[in-house]
Image (cartoon, rainbow, N blue to C red):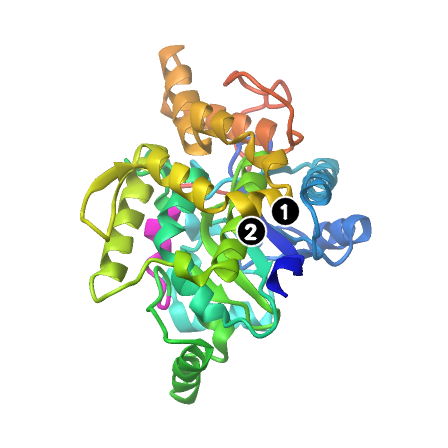
Amino acid sequence: MTLDFPYTFGIEEEFFLVNPRSRGLMARVPKAYLKACRTRLGNVVAPELLQSQIEVATRVLSDFDEAAETLDTCRAGLAEVAEAMQYRLVAAGTHPSSHWSGLEATEKPRYARLMADFGIVGRRNVLCGLHVHVAVPPGVDRVVVMNGVMRWLPLFLALSTSSPFWNRHATGLLSYRQAAYDEWPRTGIPEFFRDQADYDGFAARLVDAGAMRDASFLWWAIRPALRYPTLELRIADACTRAEDSLIIAALYRCLVRALVRDPSLAVPYDGHTRRVIDENRWRAKRDGMEAQFVDERDGRVRPLTEWLEALLAMTAPDRAALEADRVLHRLPTLLARGSSAHAQLQAYQQARDGGAVHDEALRAVVDWLVSRTTQKIGSDERLDTRCDPRFTDTRPDRSVAEA
């Protein structure tokens, strides 16, 4: 029975590696770093498209205590190995100041193909995300569940925004990562496929046409995973605070369970629905938690808080079954303090108000990101945007890719 199904899950987090002197991204990272991280943490660590990035994909998780411990352990491990090699670890959707042009791709056949196929679009992919996998019971069509999740996707983006800067500039968006990622094909909100067979048929058509190697090249904001029996949430920015990653994972896990438990909870869709979701995604990109979302059922505009209240009410039995409120009781804290994007902009403004020039203020943002990336889940904090004392040397470093 689906009520007895454990709804195991996994969390993938992507990070930047930063030079502690300039605060810019490392253009090149030796293979010794990946090897040392794997020695410490195992094969949960993987390279990303660019050498300045690293990824952790957790093992299969059964409960939120295990997830919290795993996220804390992985972030601490990556950061300590990085620090021993004179790097720093940053979790954010974009880096505030580094430019893409000097970064080098990771030496891996898949990444070489991507660079060859997509050119500048691939080279500009200096973006980090949070992906959450939730297992779906055998016999339940993952694509049908995906259709029910799609109206909620902008909410998950709004809670995660962490990319307000790009190439040394404030973008006016809280998730520029989503805007940049739209350069890639097969991204954004997917179509409403009838079922898994319909989805597989579309993927096979593109494979047959030579457009992609397999369905893992469908990079939509949500997708049925190719190698696992999971539904993968991909819309979220990389969360600077591990606690925010855990909150998003908990909320998503409850939503998947709710839609399996009661398929009638999925709102019917029509020819307008996907475009309305895309409008809401735009509002989440720009406004984050202040977004006003359009309800496709009646056209009314409602604040994010009302959408969140509706989702929490809909998933009440699932929150109880999965003991998710042990995590979700921190949602009011997230809403009160804002996402990483809010804090980054505040760190920048406080530095400018204190007399810092533009580049100094951007370095202050990176200092804030470094200090919060390894903060343990559940540790209360006040917003403190002072420079981390470890970052006092501002001499330029030629290995760092900056404009």
Where 358 sits versus 167, above or below? Answer: above
Front position in the image: 304 or 185: 304
Does the CB distance between marks 2 and 1 fall below 8 Å?
A: yes
Name the residue located 38 percent from the left edge and 26 percent from the top edge.
345
Q: Amino acid at mark 1?
A: Leu
Name the residue carrying label 2: 253
Q: Residue at x 42, y 77 (%)?
A: 199
Which quadrant of the figure has residue 188? bottom left
* Residue 232 at x, y percent in the picture: 52, 60
The first of marks 2 and 1 along the sequence is 2
Q: Which residues are magenta?
A: 177-186
Q: Where residue 356 sits: x, y (%)?
A: 40, 16
Q: Residue 98 sits in which quadrant?
A: top left
Residue 52 relative to residue 234: left or right:
right
Number of labels in the image equals 2
Q: Is residue 16 above or below residue 183?
A: above
Q: Is residue 33 one of those drawn in magenta?
A: no
Residue designated by label 1: 322
Q: CA distance from mark 2 to mark 1?
A: 9 Å
